[in-house]
Amino acid sequence: MTSINAGTTMKVKKTKAPTPSVGIGRTKKVATKKIGAGGVRTKKGAIGASAGASKKRPAAPPLQPSSLAKPEQIEKLLAMDAQEAKLTISDLVHHAFGERLPFHDGITKPHTASSTRDRAAAAADIAIACRELGATVVLRRYGVLDAVEKMIIPLGIGAVFGNADGTNPGGGMRKIASTASLTSFNNTDNTTVSSGDDRTNATDSKRGKSTPPNAREGSLLLLRALCQIVGKSAEPYVVPLLAAAIDEAASSNGAVREAAEDTSVAIIKLASSHAVPKLICPVLFEALHSPEWRVKALALDSIAQCASKHPAKVSKLLPVIIPIVTAQVWDTKAQVTKAASSTLLAACNTNINPDVLPAIPAVVNAIVKPAETLKAVDELMATTFVATVDASTLSILCPILSRGLKEKNALHQRKCCVVIENMSRLVDSPEAVAPFGPLLVPELKKVAENVQFSDIRDAALAALNALTKALGHADIESAVKTIMQAEAEAAEAEQKRIQAERDAEKAKEEENRIREEEERRQFREAMEAQRLLDKLALQEEEEKKAEEDKKKEKQKLSTKSAKGTCQGCGLKKCKKSCLFYVK
C-alpha cells in the first residue's frame, strides 16, 4: 500500500484552456495597451489625454439654412407683413433654442428631439432673415438679441467670468460692462421673443447656469451665423457678446464648448481693428482671471488670433499683453501653459523692429524657460541696433535683461549692460522707456556698485548713463531719485487702495452686523408679541371653557332642559301629575 507524506510529489498534466469565442466562429480580441504621446497608458487606438489636448479642432464648416435656403422661400419672407414676419422669426428662434412649439405642433403630437444640425439650420435661417430684412429690424425690433442674452447671460454681462467660491466672485466684467452691454440700446418699439420656460435638460448648476445647454448652444450658433452670413452689419451686436461666448467654454456640455470656441473665432474674425484695444482685449484680459482653465485657454487662443489678424494694433498693446500672458505661463494646467507660450510668440512677432525680430524666438523661449535666459542674451549681443526702439520692443527685451542682471556670473551681467546701452541710445521718446526704468535702473545701480571687476562696473555705468539720458534725466542720481520717488508714490497709492478696500470691507461688515442685530431685535419683539398673543388666546380659551362648565353644571341642577322643556314630562308647562309640577 502506497503512503502519502510531506515529501511526496505528484505530477498533474496541464490542459490548454479553450479560446473564448464570441458569436459563431469569431474569437474575442483582447485590447492591448500602449503608451500614448503624453505618457498616459491608453487602450489601443485611443488618444492619450495630453496628446488629444495638444491637437486643435479643425475649422467648423459654414452653417447651412433649411427653411430659407431657396430664393422663392426668401421672397415669401419678404412678402410677409411685419406681424407675420415677427411670428416667423419667433418660431425660428424657438427652433434654434431647441424648444417645441406646442401651439403649432400640438402637445400630444409625437416629435423628434432637437439636434445640433437642426439648431444650426434654424440659426442660419435667422441670419438670412436678418440679412434680408435688416439687422436692426430682426435683432432689435423683433427682440432676437434680447432672447439670446436671456439664454447665455441671464444674470447680465457683468456676471460673466465669475464664480461663487471667492476667487472671482460676482463676475469680472462689471467694470467694463457699460462698454460691452447691449441693454443700453433701448428701443420703445422692442418686442422680446419669449422663450419657453421648460428647464428639464441638464444645466451647469455649479456655474450658476439656469438655462438648458441646447438653448445656450443655439444662442452661440446664432451669433456665429450672424458673423458668417450677415457680416459687418451685425458687428455692433455680436462683438459685445464675445465675453459670454468665451465664458461658455467652461460648460460641462461638449457641444456647448465647441459652439463657444467656433463662435469666439467667428466674432474676432468679424471684428474691426478699432475694437481690439478698447473692447476685445479688455474682455480677453478679464477672461484670464476666470477660475476655469478652458476659458483661459480659449482667451489666449483669441489673443493669438487678434495678433495674426490685427498685428499693428496688437504691437502697440505689447507692454500690456506681455506681462498678462507671461503670468499664464506658470499655470498649473499644461493646456494653459502651452497656449500661453504660443500666444506670447504670436504677440511678440507683431513687433515691427527688424533688428530684434530674429531674436524673438529665443527671447520668448527665455521668458517661458528662465534657464534659457543666457542664450537669449547671447542672441541680443549679436544684434546690431539700427532702427528706433519703441515701447513694444522694450516690453519684449526688458524682462529678459532685468533677469540677466540678477545673474551671479559677472560676465553675463556685462552682456546685459552692453545690450541695454546699445538699446537705450535708440529709444524714440522718454515716455516709451519710462515704464521700464524701475525695472532696469535699480539693477544696473547694484551692478555698478557691487561687482568687483572694474570693466564690468564701467559697462554698467555706461549703460546707466545711456538709460538715464533715454529717460530724460540729466544725471544718474536724479534718475534714481525720480524712480524711487515714483516707486514710493506707487507703493503709497497701493497702500491707500488696500486700506480703502479694508475700510470698505469693515464698513460693510459693520453694516451687516447692525442689520443682523436689528433683525434679531425685531425677531425677539415678534416672538414676545406672539408669546403674549398665545397667552391671551389661552386665557380666553380657559375662560370660555370655564363658562361652558358652569352652564353645564347649572343645567344639571335645573328641572328645565336647554330647550325650556321639563326634564320629567317633556312639556314646557308641566302637568299636575309631573313630579316637578309647581303651582
Image: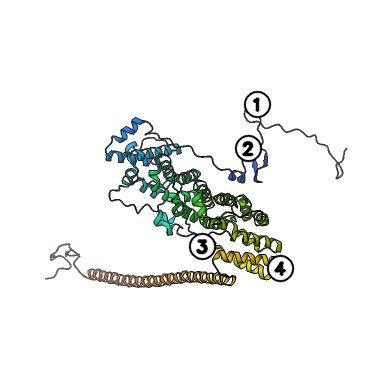
User: Which dot, 4 or 1, sits closer to the camera?
Assistant: 4
Under circle 1, the secondary element is loop
Q: Residue at x 75, y 33 (%)?
A: 16
The structure residue drawn at horizontal position 83% and vertical position 37%, both measured from the top left corner, is 11
Q: Which residue is mark 3?
A: 431
Query: What is the three-letter code of the residue carrying label 2?
Result: Gly
**Residue under pointer 2:** 45
Which mark identifies residue 25?
A: 1
Q: Are the residues tagged 4 and 3 within 8 Å (C-beta)?
A: no
The first of marks 3 and 2 along the sequence is: 2
Check disc 4: other Cα within 10 Å, few if <14, some if 14-19, many if 20+: few
| SS for dot 3 | helix
| Quadrant that contains the C terminus | bottom left
User: Which mark is nearer the camera, 1 or 2?
Assistant: 2
Mark 1 or mark 3: whose residue is earlier in sequence: 1
Q: How many marks?
A: 4
The kind of residue tagged 3 is: Glu
Residue at (33% x, 43% y) in the render:
138
- The answer to which of marks 4 and 1 sits earlier in the sequence is 1
Percent coordinates x, y for residue 23 in the rendering: 62, 29
Q: Is residue 42 visible?
A: yes
Q: Badge 2: few (under 14), some or many (20 or more) residues near its Cα, within 10 Å?
A: few
**Left or right of residue 40, residue 521 in this image:** left
Q: What's under tag 4, amino acid-wise?
A: Ser
Q: Taking 578 as reference, is 36 above or below it?
A: above
Say which amino acid is labelled 1: Gly
Residue 407 is labelled as: none
What distance separates the C-alpha of mark 1 from that of mark 3?
82 Å
